[in-house]
Amino acid sequence: MSGPSDYQPTNPVLKWIERRLPIFGLMHSSFVAYPTPRNLNYWWTFGAILSLMLGVQIVTGVVLAMHYTPHADLAFRSVESIVRDVNYGWLMRNMHAAGASMFFFAVYVHMFRGLYYGSYKEPREVLWILGVIIYLLMMATGFMGYVLPWGQMSFWGATVITNLFSAIPWAGDTIVTWLWGGYSVGNPTLNRFFSLHYLLPFVIAGVVVLHVWALHVAGQNNPAGVEARTEKDTVPFTPYATIKDMFGVSCFLILYSWFIFYMPNYLGDADNYIPANPGVTPPHIVPEWYYLPFYAILRSIPNKLAGVIAMFSAILVLAFLPWLDTAKTRSSKYRPLAKQFFWIFVVVCVLLGYLGAQPPEGVYVIAARILTIYYFAYFLILLPLLSRIEKPRPVPNSIADDVLAKYGSKTPPMVSTVIALMVAGALFAGSTQNAKAEEEVTPPSLKWSFSGPFGKYDRGALQRGLKIYKEVCSNCHGLSYIAFRNLGDPGGPGYSPAQVAAFASEYKIKDGPNDQGDMFERPGRAADYFPSPFANDQAARAANGGGLPPDLSLIAKARSYERGFPWFIFDFFTQFQEQGPNYVAAILQGYQKKPAGASLPEGTFYNKYFPGHAIKMPQPLTNGQVTYDDGSPATLEQYSKDIATFLMWAAEPQMEARKRLGFQVFVFLVIFTGLMYFTKKKVWADAH
Amino acid sequence: MTTASSVDTSRRDFLFVATGAAAAVGGLATLWPFIAQMNPDASTIAAGAPIEVDLSPIAEGQDIKVFWRGKPIYISHRTKKQIEEARSVPVSSLPDPQSDQARVKEGHDQWLVVIGICTHLGCIPIAHEGNYDGFFCPCHGSQYDTSGRIRQGPAPANLAVPPYQFVSDTKIQIG
């Protein structure tokens, strides 16, 4: 569609370059004059959104790599120091983490668009296959990226996925050892994943160039599935598609910003705020949401090798689509049967995703098997069958006719789609009943001053919580990510520099070696971190009957609980993310007399909210134990709220800055989206 | 498209200008954090906080080296002879004219505090070496005197004096 351009720049310098490297002509013919179908809908803006997200991930990734240390002993801490100390480090990290999810969300919309409108059909087969290659590269990149923070889920996700390759007959174990660079996932693995994670996005960029090139050879598909023939069918890419894409991008940025500024941990796993521990497996190992459907397919096959083959086949089958679906009609708009099966397929993918996050037990397994069968049947049986037996509706004569056609008649709701959605809803509801049947007691939801878009830490609560930590908790628990200087940072307890110095000087900090080669103790300074009560984990265990009191810096983000359906949907909109503080406060008040008949292991105590109810920590706080200087009630309830508030600040000291910038960004984006909307309408006024 | 009225045209232009301006502002505002993140982070700034150095263990004629903000700093307890030598030189004859008094604190003339980085190409000069009983840089032969001033060699400037003050007669705070 875009041949040699007759574009000539007027500027003499540009003319000089153009004669030697016709890059301006190329840019012009590809992105300015390029004929774009006039009838594209907003599903077509996701190509531009994806290009933007690739750029965003590369830029934020390069920036993060300036501060990240890819060593097993240092990686977790380096990520925390990015979030706490680097200027706008929290923003970079949130952009990159949320960006990965947004990147996959956009790619799934983009792929479903391709499926629905037959964009994989002749002559766009290579374009489609290049897309599958990009998708595979994205999955590899995302997997390796998630390992880098070296949290529990990073480590164990890496262990599970790399172990998949041991299913390969004869060479499997050798391959896994080769991948690991050792006898288990460890530092060599982390180092090479960092290197490859940095490399692959540029490989993706290269394949994207081929993808866009292949696209420009054939030209865009369009909702009618009818190829462009005359000039009346198309408009120049700039300004029509450019401005429309910018509007689409602007709307997308609003969703993206919601995650960055207000729900940064919604799509993540609390366990990844626990440093990787090769000796402790998390109760549920779950990949990031964008892998869940394939994880469900993997686990639904009882045979290890067959499961691995099924999982990879589920992706590879996409590459064969142009030869599986040979129907002449491109767009499902005119294929009434194919359309319904398509929507069922979408629901099946969503449900498989849900099942991928559930424990592989009971009704979940059966459901996953049924849905896996549908998944493969859709590609291998349904689509080929429909190609032969379906009678499509007549397509428009041209794109221009499609644009002129009246959109007045509303298509009647498809009965089968409604049934499919009801089945999905029933499955959801059914599985939550199972969840409730388990012995999990949910902590009560308390009111927190820092919740919501305008939440702030209650300074009094922070100072009281600090007092509790110092007098009670610090005897067993470290707070090693907090430095004394943080007590004076904005958005925290609000100590003055003099108060910080005085507070620090009360501590004895180990330093050295001195000129004699000995370690010595000196008074603390603002730059020092809270010292841990024990020299190392072994000493901590020895002093606590074998139990290891966890460092409390991140406890408020490392603990969570299921909210269940439909609450987790409402939570996204209400910005509920206070599971951690609710849990901490509940544990502290949850000590009860052991119920009759319950057996407690030796040396543990009964706690209503602790999973399994047997906690090794004796009740740490009781009424009247700590005297408050500001006259607040010296009750266990007050202590619990204050220490939970303090620990939330310790886990996320930059929260107030995050919400403040978030508000400014949202105001800007809403205004900008409005401006883009009207600009788009003005630009398109003569084209519709 | 039929000819638009001038009101419509100016409304459209206003819209385009407003959108373009908003995009530019948004773009610059987005760019700023990416630039700011390369500035020293909070832990680096905290590690570069002023340090206190106790001078009492340093005997006359002795010097020590401390590190502050990653830079080596010489603290020299000068003898009377060294101070005399520094002050007897005509200031105008120096490659980088500066009086000794301007390089030390009044009332504490025996204490010389200089950053131990040669102003030529950044090597660390050796103390108590060279023709002037000051510092000698082994890389390209620059010679500094007992006031840390360049006397001979390719270095263009005197050894830099870091910001410091006396918190007591025997203690200084650097930074």
Image (spheres, grey):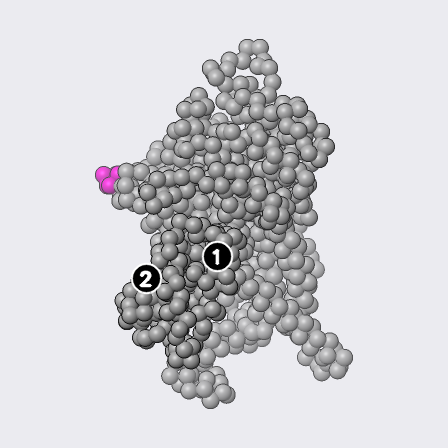
Closer to us: mark 1 or mark 2? 2
* Magenta span of residues: A169-174
Q: Which residue is mark 2?
A: B127
Residue at left offset 45%, top offset 72%: B99
Looking at the figure, which quarter contains the N terminus of chain B? Answer: bottom right
Q: Are marks 1 and 2 in contact (CB under 8 Å)?
A: no
- Report which quarter residue A19 is drawn in: bottom left
Residue B113's tag is none
* Crowd band around label 1 with a 10 angstrom C-alpha radius: few (<14), some (14–19), many (20+): some
Residue at left offset 37%, top offset 34%: A278
Q: Which residue is mark 1?
A: B174
Examine the rendering and report whether any part of residue A350 can be seen.
no
Q: Amino acid at mark 2?
A: Ala
Left or right of A71 on screen, residue A238: right
Q: Amino acid at mark 1?
A: Ile
Q: Residue furthest top?
A: A597
- Please give the chain letter of the residue carrying mark 2: B
* Same chain letter for marks 1 and 2: yes
Residue at left offset 44%, top offset 44%: A76
Left or right of B18 on screen, residue B127: left
Residue at left offset 28%, top offset 38%: A183
Q: Nearer the viewer, residue A396 or A509?
A: A509
